[in-house]
Amino acid sequence: MSRTLHLPEQFIHLPRYPLLYPNPSPIHPLQTLTTQLNPSNTSKISLYTKREDHSSPLACAGNKYRKLEYIVPDILSSKPPITTLVTEGAVQSNHTVQVAAVARKLGLKALVLLGKNTGGGLAAASDQEAFLRTGNVQVAKLLGAHVRLLDAADVARLTAKSDEYDTPHILMDELRKEGSVPYWIPSGASLHPLGGVGYARCAVEISMQEEELQLPGSGRFDYVFVACGSGSTVGGLIAGFKLVEKFEKAQQGCEMRPRQVIGIPISPTKPLEWHQTRVLDFARKAAGLIGLDSTRDVTMDDVRLDDRFAGSRYGVLDTETKQTLEMMARTEGVVLDPVYTAKVLRGMVHYVQHGELDSDPAQHVNALFIHTGGQAALAAYADID
Ligand SMILES: *Cc1c(COP(=O)(O)O)cnc(C)c1O
């Protein structure tokens, strides 16, 4: 049976500027890891990864390009014409590099604000000088971005008159006075009204790939593990799978078990409820844009976040996360990033090792780990060997 999806008109007609390769980002099995975690090969679990780090030809491919595909048309249609993209992140932010690359591709300038006190990466670095100029900082500069490193006092001054999109109005006014026309992209692009749509599209893409892969058992990815940082990646996926499952239900006349998207928060700073509320909000916003009923079709029951793997701080590589990063490199030959994906894989491995997937009533379980990129930060985490 074909699972060709007929997307709602509303979704098809949302303007999208291609930043990704035209083909879906690859999904491949994690055969060696699966065997390593279950040497007797008695497990009913199959592990896979979707390589969002191979999704785009642009610098340091990662999940932000997919989100930016839906934001670029808004940038290009703004009046007066935008001259400068402005965004923010932690010192080793992947998001800001992806915004900088998009700016260059569009012939625009990029101003990148990096908060030295955002997360604990800088404070924990054994060589702070190096942390401030290697990895993603180096790449952002190579791309010609104007990089401003901010301490707490700078952040307080520039963000004093902020709004629901975290817009630093004081800075934006300063830029306008200098003759620029700035466009603000919030941290991780999540608070942007279009921030979740890219990952809703990704969920549809995954559902098409499920069919090509001829997965065992349910024929779908029963579990999808993904990082929850600013939150619209997991929020968008939740909305997109809701859409897919609505179509599957209509085609098959019966409801199958929903795929479980498990978001792994990578910072312990905010309580779980804070993340849940935000992710629900992003999922609902995306749902409304792709042709679902935002409040009826997406509820808090769809938001599954597991904060056991957040570690000590955002941007800090705790022992378990470091071991996971090393294990993945040495089993699969696949390199993770120290801030997001290593924590997510640690979570998935925990589910496998502690029977949390085995206890699923299904006879076979397919689990997908979304590799969202970020390896450029490794250079700044030089103590990993
Ligand atoms: C930004 C980022 C994430 C988190 O995505 P959000 O949408 O902010 O939750 C995960 N992995 C990497 C490598 C990232 O750069």
Image: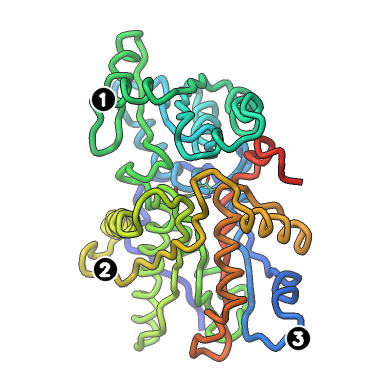
Rendered image coloring scheme: rainbow
Q: 4 or 348: which is nearer to us?
A: 348
**In-image side of 375 versus 84 (left or right):** right
Q: Residue at x 55, y 51 (%)?
A: 340
**In-image side of 171 versus 223 (left or right):** left
The picture quadrant where one finds residue 133 is top right
**Residue type, mark 1 in image:** Ala
The picture quadrant where one finds residue 305 is bottom left
Q: Which badge, 3 or 1, is on the more N-terminal residue?
A: 3
Q: Residues within 10 Å of mark 1 (few under 14, many from 20)?
A: some
Residue bearing the label numbered 3: 40
- Mark closer to the observer (3, 2): 3
Residue bearing the label numbered 2: 299
Q: 262 or 294: which is nearer to us?
A: 262
Q: Residue at x 28, y 37 (%)?
A: 165
| Residue at disc 2, secondary structure | loop
- The answer to whether one can see residue 382 in this image is yes
Question: How far from the left and from the top, in percent, is residue 154?
Answer: 38, 20
**Residue type, mark 3 in image:** Ser
Q: CA distance from mark 3 to mark 2?
A: 40 Å
| Residue at disc 1, secondary structure | loop
Question: How far from the left and from the top, in percent, is residue 180?
Answer: 37, 14
- The answer to whether one can see residue 24 in this image is no
| Residue at disc 3, secondary structure | loop
Q: CA distance from mark 3 to mark 1?
A: 58 Å
Label drawn at residue 160: 1
**In-image side of 168 versus 340 (left or right):** left
